[in-house]
């Protein structure tokens, strides 16, 4: 339910990786785009008789309403006994502390979210979510949902340079839910206390931190190999999200990208992201306050090279276990009832 011809951003990162991996496993028909484009494509697909012979349909839903054509198409496919796995990527509409409750668009989104989920559930054979907590929030406790966490790119083997002292943050630095404001304060506090630490922020145009920039803050437009070029001076990657009911359930895609960078992670103690880092033993989990973040950075700077290397190796291993190819195989196995 997103276009895939406008560059890699947010949800299209996940979809593009899955598309590429699914193409190595099955004969894949792809319908992608915003509502108008999907209406035309789905109508043509159904009227052309192409539903016959399909072994399964995988749906990546958007945060907006599905079009009536989406529901009709999936309903027809389900009536033809084609297995349908629908993935729900987030549910921030259900949480008052996420977004602006005064926004007309936000209020509308919250009012229609539950009916949207009910409609998608009715025309799907199974529903998938990135985490168990999110599945429970949307469908209720005890629901048998498929878990499809984000995947990770293949890890890169880039050595840490002697004296590396930079934290790496990738994402929207103006969105309060990302916690960048407290990250900047924490770095400033650490430096005031004598910590030799700097910060690389990689963001899209218009998503940079606001206000005057200190000389220890380095802003970049980068993706893929351009981010890899920053890694020699990267001591650790960081996710400073404030802890709240929604962030406890969310699993950011960039967490798995970070694993592939082969660097220790410093993450706040939001439940799901903290679990991933702890289970992988791939870094440090800290509280979400400025003080806790600053203390975590100080601990990181005092950690020996052997431990840093151990965390880095564990991060890379976790990335291998969570490869996008593994996620694609899960989808095929669920839809076909067999092995990919």
Image (spheres, rainbow, N blue to C red):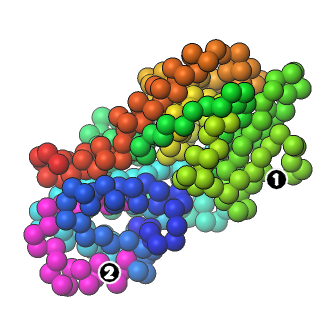
Q: x, y percentage for residue 98?
A: 62, 48
Residue sitting at x 57%, y 28%: 264
Q: Quadrant of the N terminus?
A: bottom left
What residue sits right under mark 2 in the picture? 41
Q: Residue at x 54, y 37 (%)?
A: 158
Q: Residue at x 58, y 46 (%)?
A: 228
Q: Is residue 31 above or below residue 270?
A: below
328 left or right, relative to 248: left
**Frontmost residue, 74 versus 317:** 317
- Displayed quadrant of residue 200: top right
Residue 237 point in image, percent of width and height: 62, 35
Magenta part of the protein: which range? 38-60
For the residues labelled 2 and 1, the Cα–Cα distance comes to 41 Å
Considering only vertical position in the picture, is 296 above or below 244? above
Q: Position of residue 207 (x, y in %)?
A: 71, 57
Residue 80, label in figure:
none
On screen, residue 145 versus residue 9, left or right, reads left
Image: 268 above or below 338: above
Tell me the element at label 2: helix
Near mark 2 (Cα within 10 A), the count class, few <14, some 14-19 or many ≥20, is some
* Residue on which the image places disc 1: 210
Mark nearer the N terminus (2 vs 1) = 2
Q: Residue at x 14, y 81 (%)?
A: 49
């Amino acid at each position: 339910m997103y276009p895939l011809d406008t560059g890699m951003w947010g949800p299209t990162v996940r979809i593009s990786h899955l598309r590429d991996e699914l193409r190595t496993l099955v004969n894949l028909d792809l319908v992608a785009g915003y509502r108008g484009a999907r209406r035309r494509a789905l109508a043509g697909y159904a009227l052309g008789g192409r539903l016959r012979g399909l072994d399964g349909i995988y749906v990546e839903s958007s945060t907006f309403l599905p079009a009536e054509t989406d529901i009709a198409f999936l309903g027809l496919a389900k009536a033809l006994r084609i297995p349908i796995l629908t993935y729900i990527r987030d549910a921030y509409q259900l949480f008052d502390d996420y977004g602006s409750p005064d926004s007309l668009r936000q209020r509308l989104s919250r009012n229609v979210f539950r009916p949207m989920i009910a409609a998608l559930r009715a025309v799907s054979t199974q529903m998938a979510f990135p985490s168990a907590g999110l599945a429970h929030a949307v469908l209720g406790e005890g629901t048998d949902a498929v878990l499809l966490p984000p995947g990770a790119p293949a890890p890169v083997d880039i050595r840490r340079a002697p004296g590396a002292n930079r934290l790496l943050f990738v994402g929207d630095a103006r969105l309060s839910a990302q916690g960048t404001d407290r990250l900047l304060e924490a770095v400033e506090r650490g430096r005031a206390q004598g910590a030799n630490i700097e910060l690389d922020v990689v963001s899209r145009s218009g998503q940079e931190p606001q206000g005057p920039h200190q000389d220890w803050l380095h802003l970049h437009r980068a993706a893929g190999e351009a981010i890899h070029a920053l890694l020699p001076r990267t001591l650790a990657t960081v996710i400073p999200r404030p802890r709240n009911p929604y962030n406890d359930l969310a699993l950011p895609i960039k967490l798995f990208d970070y694993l592939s960078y082969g660097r220790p992670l410093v993450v706040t103690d939001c439940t799901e992201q903290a679990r991933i880092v702890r289970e992988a033993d791939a870094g440090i989990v800290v509280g979400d306050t400025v003080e806790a973040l600053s203390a975590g950075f100080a601990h990181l700077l005092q950690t020996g090279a052997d431990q840093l290397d151990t965390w880095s190796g564990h991060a890379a291993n976790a990335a291998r276990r969570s490869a996008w190819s593994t996620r694609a195989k899960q989808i095929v196995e669920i839809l076909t009832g067999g092995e990919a």
